[in-house]
Image: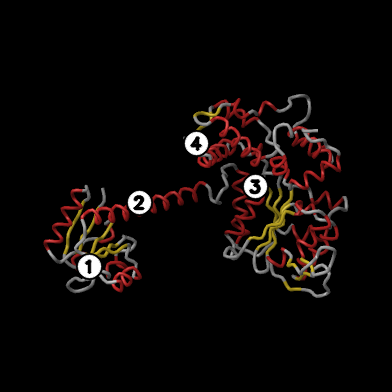
Amino acid sequence: MSNILVVEDEPIIQESLLRLLQRQGHDATGVASVAEAEENSINMYDLIISDLRLPGEPGTELISRAAPTPVLIMTSYSTVQSAVEAMKQGAVDYISKPFNHDEMIMTVKRILDKANVEQQNTLLQKEVARNYPIDGMVAHCEPMLEVLDRVRRVAATDTTVLIVGETGTGKELVARAIHSQSKLRKHSLVSVNCAAFAEDQIESELFGHERGAFTGALQTKKGLIEVANGATLFLDEIGELSLDAQARLLGVLQDSEIRRVGSNKTIKVEARILAATHKNLAQMVAEQTFREDLYYRLNVFEINLPPLRERGSDIRLLADTILTRMAQRTHRKSMSFDEEAYQQMLHYPWPGNVREMENVVERAVILKHNGSIEAEDLALNNLETDQQLPLYELENRLSLDDYFVSFVKKYQARYNETELARMLGISRKNLWERRQRLEIPSRKS
């Protein structure tokens, strides 16, 4: 049990309190003043219970001297003012004499329980910081450790960062990690998915517009870049921007100013830019679909995220982490994977990367209820197994539209529209629009 120091100058009350605490299994020691308390190593105790009025110095003197040990103040002079003063000085709680024994026992238990939880949380946070240096990121393989190192190095700077990686590899998570470790962490991270807006909307969303600038512009609107003034702006899927929007974004990076649609006035904006894409921007520059000058402005510092299939033992660790989170979220009992399930995950190509793994594990948790998740619960072998190349190889050999068609046709029987859109890194609206343009029938057709 706990080690408690009682500081009370009235012998009868001190003895009574010591016996009460000892009957509860605590190791309790009694002294009569602050000076006597300090002769003992006051920081070795789990709790100090002290009278307010003591010979020499008041009991509240122990609050700062014994920190972080919690101090419970008791007094027979119970007034609101003395209670407030004690709490202002940092007392963990306040109890009046004569106290009810049950009340004292419950108060002591609550304080010790809270202190124990806080201690466990501190230890857990240190353990998490050691094993998973960036919140939410499991990283033990060499490529991911290099990612973490680059995040730490660039976070403290104002440098523009380009985050590159396949859909579902965690580009937004890296952006959030950079922001959370930067000097702008107390400000907002403004995130924009450039693929979520139609071409005629993106400039208005990014740069804002004046009232009457176009049909439907009923009032002046700030753009997201302006909203991010003094903060961090994350532009996801930057490769989806039109050439016109790219030209205007270049002006922001060069001159730190924007001009709303329909306005002749410029507005000064200072925002740190983080950008991400699953596309090969260098190839797009060669094909003249992405501005070369903007590419070099964005690609000051590049962080390249490895696909899940190249992360080796991280696959097992990620699966366990996701399973624990999903089981808690769905109020399931403790769950685990059997070895065959692990092996199936290790050999599966994961075209949707971590995002796809989250979907697969969540579905297995919902269907399994509890116990061990087996390979058949993951249903990874239900994918087409004909002579088609894996999608990650198709991506390198086919055009973007061909890859999109192959991906949707291959997985639409297994995932709903929301999940498909999430795996592709686009909105449901954008998925629907591309279906129409590329004439991909839905599974209901």
The numbered mark, 4 or 2, whose residue comes first in the sequence reads 2
Tell me the CA gap for discs 2 and 3.
34 Å
Q: Which residue is mark 1?
A: 75
Determine the secondary structure under disc 1. strand
Q: Which mark is residue 332?
A: 4
On-image quarter of the C terminus: top right
Tell me the CA gap for discs 4 and 1.
47 Å
Q: Quick one: label 3, few (<14), some, or many (20+) residues within 10 Å?
A: many
The numbered mark, 1 or 3, whose residue comes first in the sequence reads 1
Q: Which residue is mark 2?
A: 116
In the image, what residue type sits under mark 3?
Answer: Gly
In the image, what residue type sits under mark 1?
Answer: Thr
Tell me the CA gap for discs 4 and 3.
26 Å
Residue 298 percent across, percent down from the top left: 75, 59
Residue at 80% in and 75% down: 265
Q: Which mark is residue 170?
A: 3
Residue at 31% in and 60% down: 70
The numbered mark, 4 or 1, whose residue comes first in the sequence reads 1
Q: Are the two marked residues, 4 and 1, in contact with CB atoms closer than 8 angstroms?
A: no
